[in-house]
């Protein structure tokens, strides 16, 4: 199916330049949006730009998955594919060959992340109009969409680049636009401003750590290209500068990925940002940072280094476990639904990090599958909350009481995503949790499996509280009439909910992606 | 149509009937459905082919066997279906949509689980039995019943979670989820499943949920509950852990310890709950022996036990329904006003005490012989002691305190007709399978249904030594009861002169049991209290740490995180530097 996009749908130039276009199209559109007077027009433009990104992401996935038949078909048609080896697209920007120039490098791992980001981007931008129109002042709407597209471009850039310093640049592009987007929530709740400020300071600490780490690596190797690191670092594993760089980089990226206890920017940012921003960020931002972490852990460095194994065992895994327990408990006691979901996000990042810290192909693919599934379920949950914010202007548990009767379609989709988050069989969450359990058993990490089960029980409690209020409690305000979210919101929401069910029944597509992604990095890193 | 019925698990029909039943407000229609569904199930079972998997499915890449009938689960499934039928009749006097429906769904889940051919299907229905049965306790409507039902649910779900964890492990190790016997308990998967089964079967120290919840259930609920959950666990145990020697000792201990509690217990339905525990012990012990004769004993005992335990719970239910209590000190002398119920209760009591010519005798003899043939002398003696105990608390205490004993002065109506009918049918079964073989009836009918009918048909329950041993046991136990009863009534000096040595011995034994029971009775609530206090403290600690105003959420946000980041960086560096020399 994806091959047919390559051979029939995509023109030759699109196949050749898919990698830069994926980033450039939203970036250029963003600059143009500054001159667009109408918010609605800006919205349509942002949908188009996101769709273009999705298209290029599919092309890249097709190239990465291309078999020899497609390859020969493309080369006989005279299309330059930039495939240097099967499953690896390497694009030299501006014709400057790496390592001197910047390289965009796509393998199975980031093709999957790019597809996720672009897919969520399309759904989120379609869904955005009613909530943005209600929450952002009309003269700022075009700038809002410009910031969103810059953020999308930045996230895609982080996921696509093969250059360590370029990654920092894109990370800052996406982060700075995110600070702006969060601050725009001030129209609804003034607490968005301190949240954005805190996020800015903490995010900058993370970015600084990262760039210091890259500086150490540059000092030790004289290159910024990740593929070069793969080749050169094994000889320098005993070098103190390399080790210090490693420490700086994992902490910096860990902060961006909301690794416990460096997650404290997240709950407030998610709770007070505009609904659309929360939805988009929850499904993409931490995921992309986690991708970058995986990239560094398995491609640049590798589990073959004893210091990396040690930090898996003594740093990342314990922090993951702590996140799963502590943040689930914190989620239990929240009274605001968005904060509950935000804390649960940190806990779920713990699941993914736990999978990664197993350092086996099974563990990494389980972590990646959970990453995809979590993007789908959290995206759906925040969309449903956005619907409630739109119609009832409230996000506390009390505001949710009795909504099952007044907004049945919204709340049914919410319930499906909530069950998926808990990990009920026949939903996406079950598939990835069972894989995580298997991976933990496979590595003999008994205690980790126990914590996964325990944390799932906590998830039952915190999601159960919300579901109980929604479906079994009488509304606080008896005048609440039946008021469903608008269609524009419901359709993307139900796409998310059905995706959760579909993956619950047949996980072969995301699982295949996750597995080949894990194989790509575990193989490339030269690890065990 | 026939072909369809042959390949459909009868449990599904019952579950469907139960769910539909919850939605039918018309009483007669609903109750008609409730009575018909088990009969349809029995018919479907009679058509089942025992040599193949009758219904399979594939889900998430796993091969599931939804319906398989073999010699082991046939008799359990049949007993479940008969019990469901009797229960439906017994419930006819009440008009309770939820209770009718959930009782049938519960029975259906147990039947479906009995005929499940793989672990995952078993798990699904294992959980369904837990979820559906909790309503039977909840519907009693009292505050105590509400809390008991929540405790019950928590324990049952825990059992399900353990089972699921075990299944995950087994799948991870073997790549399949077939329902095959384990070879040892060293495997963590086997251990997890063993505990899951242990909870449902109420192994010692995992048993408290049973005595906690069953006596608090509704009149009908207690009857329904007594049939399925523990026997499903027995079946699963026989499937997965036959011949595990540890089960012999678990079973033997299980038969003995409830005796003491049952003797000093005042609530007669709780006495029955203890004796249920004790009876399941016999079956577990037989499974531990694991020979064909012993497995026959477990299956036969389960079948007979479902019938007479239901009968006893029915009779106590009738008493509760008419008088409003089952406390021994508030009852007595009811034989005058409830004569038929008295007779049925006596039949049940005779059956559970294994009087010859009643069902308990032909079933229990198999187990006792199997234990003896394999040379487990200590276990055999323990079972023998427990047999006497059964008579003491279930055989005599129940009918004596309820229907005879000191006259409470209560004059009530005889039980409703539908209750009498259900009790009558159950009594008929208890007697018919206890008689010597005649015209295809009698114990031969039961023995033909057992997992190893050839072995069973070679076995003669009515031999002189069996009958003699049993009668000696029973007579002495009755004598003991009479003596104790008398000395309980009169000051101890008077009778002390008549039976000195024996008296001190018995007095000591009884006194010890009494003392142990009192200690246990005091220590139990004290422990619960302390556990409650600790749990409360723990909850407060957790809330103090994690709530929005808690310790984790306090302090300068940005500065705090900067410190955290620095600390983690230091740790990461330290780790790197330490591991690379």
Image (tube, helix red, strand yellow):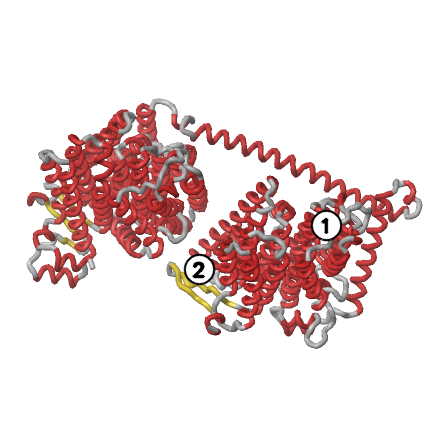
Q: Please name the residue that numbered disc 1 is placed on.
A: B259
Q: Position of residue A79 (x, y in %)?
A: 8, 56
Split into 4 quadrants, where in the image is the N terminus of chain A? Answer: bottom left
Q: Residue at the spot x=56%, y=43% of the render? A: B151
| Mark 2 and mark 1: Cα distance apart in space | 42 Å
Q: Residue at the spot x=12%, y=45% of the render? A: A20
Is B99 placed left or right of A175 in the picture? right
> Of the residues under marks 2 and 1, which one precedes in the sequence?
2
Residue neighbourhood size for the residue with mark 1, other residues' Cα within 10 Å, grouped as few (<14), some (14–19), many (≥20)? many
Q: Residue furthest bottom?
A: B439
Q: Please name the residue that numbered disc 2 is placed on.
A: B174
Is A311 placed left or right of B178 in the picture? left
Location of residue A112 with respect to A214 vertically, above or below: below
Nearer the camera: disc 2 or disc 1: 1
Q: Quadrant of residue A197?
A: top left
Q: Residue at the spot x=47%, y=31% of the render? A: B542
Q: Position of residue A25 (x, y in %)?
A: 12, 43
Q: Residue at the spot x=40%, y=28% of the render? A: B548
Q: Secondary structure at mark 2?
A: helix
Q: Quadrant of residue B440?
A: bottom right
Give the numbered dot on residue A75: none
Q: Position of residue A129 (x, y in %)?
A: 21, 39
Please tell me which residue lies in front, A336 or A116. Answer: A336
Whether residue B182 appears in this view of the structure is no
Is A475 placed left or right of B96 in the picture? left
Please tell me which residue lies in front, A442 or B90. Answer: B90
Location of residue B511 with respect to B251 vertically, above or below: above
Q: Position of residue A230 (x, y in %)?
A: 21, 45
């Amino acid at each position: 199916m994806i091959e047919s996009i390559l051979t029939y749908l995509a023109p030759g130039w699109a196949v050749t330049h898919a990698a830069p276009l994926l980033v450039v199209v939203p970036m250029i559109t963003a600059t143009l949006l500054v001159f667009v007077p109408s918010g609605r027009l800006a919205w349509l433009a942002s949908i188009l730009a996101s769709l273009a990104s999705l298209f290029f992401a599919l092309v890249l996935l097709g190239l990465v998955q291309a078999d020899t038949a497609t390859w020969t078909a493309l080369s006989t048609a005279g299309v330059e594919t930039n495939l240097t080896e099967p499953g690896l697209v390497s694009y030299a920007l501006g014709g400057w060959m790496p390592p001197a120039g910047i390289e965009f490098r796509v393998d199975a791992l980031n093709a999957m992340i790019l597809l996720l980001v672009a897919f969520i981007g399309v759904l989120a931008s379609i869904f955005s109009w009613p909530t943005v129109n209600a929450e952002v002042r009309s003269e700022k709407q075009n700038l809002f969409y410009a910031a969103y597209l810059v953020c999308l471009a930045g996230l895609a850039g982080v996921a696509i680049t093969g250059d360590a310093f370029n990654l920092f640049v894109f990370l800052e592009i996406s982060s700075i636009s995110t600070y702006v987007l969060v601050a725009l929530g001030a129209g609804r709740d003034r607490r968005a401003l301190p949240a954005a400020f805190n996020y800015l300071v903490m995010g900058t600490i993370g970015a600084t750590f990262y760039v210091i780490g890259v500086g150490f690596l540059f000092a030790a190797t004289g290159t910024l290209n990740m593929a070069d690191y793969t080749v050169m670092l094994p000889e320098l594993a005993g070098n103190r500068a390399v080790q210090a760089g490693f420490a700086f980089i994992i902490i910096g990226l860990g902060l961006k990925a909301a690794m416990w206890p460096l997650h404290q920017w997240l709950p407030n940012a998610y709770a007070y940002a505009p609904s659309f921003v929360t939805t988009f960020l929850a499904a993409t931002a931490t995921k992309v940072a986690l991708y970058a972490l995986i990239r560094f852990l398995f491609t640049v460095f590798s589990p073959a280094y004893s210091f990396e194994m040690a930090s898996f065992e003594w740093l990342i895994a314990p922090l993951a476990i702590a996140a799963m327990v502590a943040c689930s408990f914190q989620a239990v006691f929240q009274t605001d639904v968005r904060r509950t979901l935000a804390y649960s996000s940190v806990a779920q990042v713990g699941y993914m990090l736990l999978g990664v810290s197993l350092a086996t192909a099974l563990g990494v693919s389980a972590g990646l599958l959970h990453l995809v599934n979590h993007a789908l379920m959290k995206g759906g949950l925040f969309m449903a909350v956005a619907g409630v914010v739109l119609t009832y202007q409230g996000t506390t548990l009390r505001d949710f009481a009795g909504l099952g009767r007044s907004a049945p379609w919204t709340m049914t989709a919410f319930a499906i995503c909530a069950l998926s988050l808990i990990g009920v069989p026949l939903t996406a969450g079950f598939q990835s949790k069972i894989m995580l359990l298997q991976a933990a058993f496979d590595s003999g990490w008994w205690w980790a499996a126990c914590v996964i089960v325990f944390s799932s029980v906590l998830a039952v409690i915190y999601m159960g509280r919300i579901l109980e209020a929604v479906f079994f409690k009488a509304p606080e305000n008896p005048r609440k009439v039946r008021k469903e979210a608008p269609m524009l919101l419901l359709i993307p929401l139900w796409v998310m909910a059905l995706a959760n069910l579909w993956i619950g029944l047949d996980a072969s597509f995301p699982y295949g992606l996750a597995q080949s992604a894990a194989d790509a990095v575990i193989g490339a890193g030269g690890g065990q | 149509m026939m072909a369809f019925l042959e390949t459909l698990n009868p449990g599904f029909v019952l579950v469907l009937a139960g769910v539909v039943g919850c939605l039918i407000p018309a009483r007669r229609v609903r109750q008609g459905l409730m009575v018909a569904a088990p009969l349809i199930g029995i018919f479907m079972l009679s058509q089942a082919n025992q040599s193949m998997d009758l219904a399979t499915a594939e889900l998430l890449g796993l091969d599931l066997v939804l319906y398989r009938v073999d010699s082991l689960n046939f008799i359990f499934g049949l007993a479940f279906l008969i019990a469901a039928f009797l229960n439906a009749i017994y419930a006819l006097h009440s008009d309770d949509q939820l209770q009718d429906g959930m009782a049938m769904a519960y029975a259906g889940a147990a039947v479906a689980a009995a005929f499940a051919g793989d672990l995952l299907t078993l798990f699904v229905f294992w959980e369904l039995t837990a979820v559906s049965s909790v309503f039977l306790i909840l519907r009693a409507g009292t505050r105590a019943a509400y809390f008991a039902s929540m405790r019950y649910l928590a324990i049952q779900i825990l059992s399900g979670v353990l089972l699921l964890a075990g299944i995950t492990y087994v799948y991870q190790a073997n790549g399949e989820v077939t329902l095959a016997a384990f070879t040892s308990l060293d495997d963590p998967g086997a251990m997890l499943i063993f505990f899951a089964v242990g909870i449902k079967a109420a192994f010692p120290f995992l048993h408290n949920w049973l005595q906690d919840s069953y006596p608090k259930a509704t009149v009908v609920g207690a009857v329904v509950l007594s049939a399925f959950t523990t026997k499903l666990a027995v079946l699963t145990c026989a499937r997965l852990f036959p011949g595990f020697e540890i089960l012999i000792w678990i079973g033997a201990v299980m038969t003995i310890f409830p005796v003491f509690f049952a003797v000093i217990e005042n609530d007669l339905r709780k006495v029955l709950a203890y004796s249920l525990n004790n009876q399941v012990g016999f079956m577990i012990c037989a499974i531990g022996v694991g020979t064909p004769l012993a497995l026959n004993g477990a299956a036969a005992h389960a079948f007979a036990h479902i019938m007479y335990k239901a009968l006893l719970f029915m009779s106590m239910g009738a008493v509760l329904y008419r008088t409003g209590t089952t406390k021994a000190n508030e009852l007595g002398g009811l034989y005058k006003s409830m004569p038929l119920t008295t007779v049925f209760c006596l039949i049940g009591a005779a059956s559970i005490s294994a009087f010859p010519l009643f069902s308990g005798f032909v079933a229990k003899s198999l187990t006792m012989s199997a234990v003896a043939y394999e040379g487990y002398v200590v276990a055999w003696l323990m079972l023998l002691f427990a047999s006497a105990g059964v008579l003491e608390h279930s055989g005599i205490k129940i009918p004596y305190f309820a229907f005879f004993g000191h006259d409470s002065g209560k004059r009530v109506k005889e039980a409703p007709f539908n209750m009498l009918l259900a009790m009558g049918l159950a009594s008929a079964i208890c007697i018919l399978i206890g008689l010597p073989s005649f015209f295809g009836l009698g114990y031969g009918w039961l023995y033909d249904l057992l997992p190893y009918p050839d072995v069973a048909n070679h076995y003669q329950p009515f031999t002189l030594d069996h009958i003699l041993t049993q009668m000696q046991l029973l007579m002495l136990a009755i004598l003991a009861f009479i003596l104790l009863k008398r000395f309980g009534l009169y000051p101890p000096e008077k009778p002390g002169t008549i039976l000195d040595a024996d008296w001190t011995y018995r007095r000591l034994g009884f006194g010890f049991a009494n003392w142990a029971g009192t200690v246990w009775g005091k220590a139990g609530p004290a422990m619960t209290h302390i556990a409650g206090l600790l749990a409360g403290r723990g909850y407060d600690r957790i809330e103090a740490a994690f709530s929005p105003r808690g310790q984790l959420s306090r302090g300068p946000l940005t500065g705090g995180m900067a410190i955290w980041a620095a600390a983690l960086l230091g740790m990461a560096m330290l780790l790197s530097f330490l591991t690379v020399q």
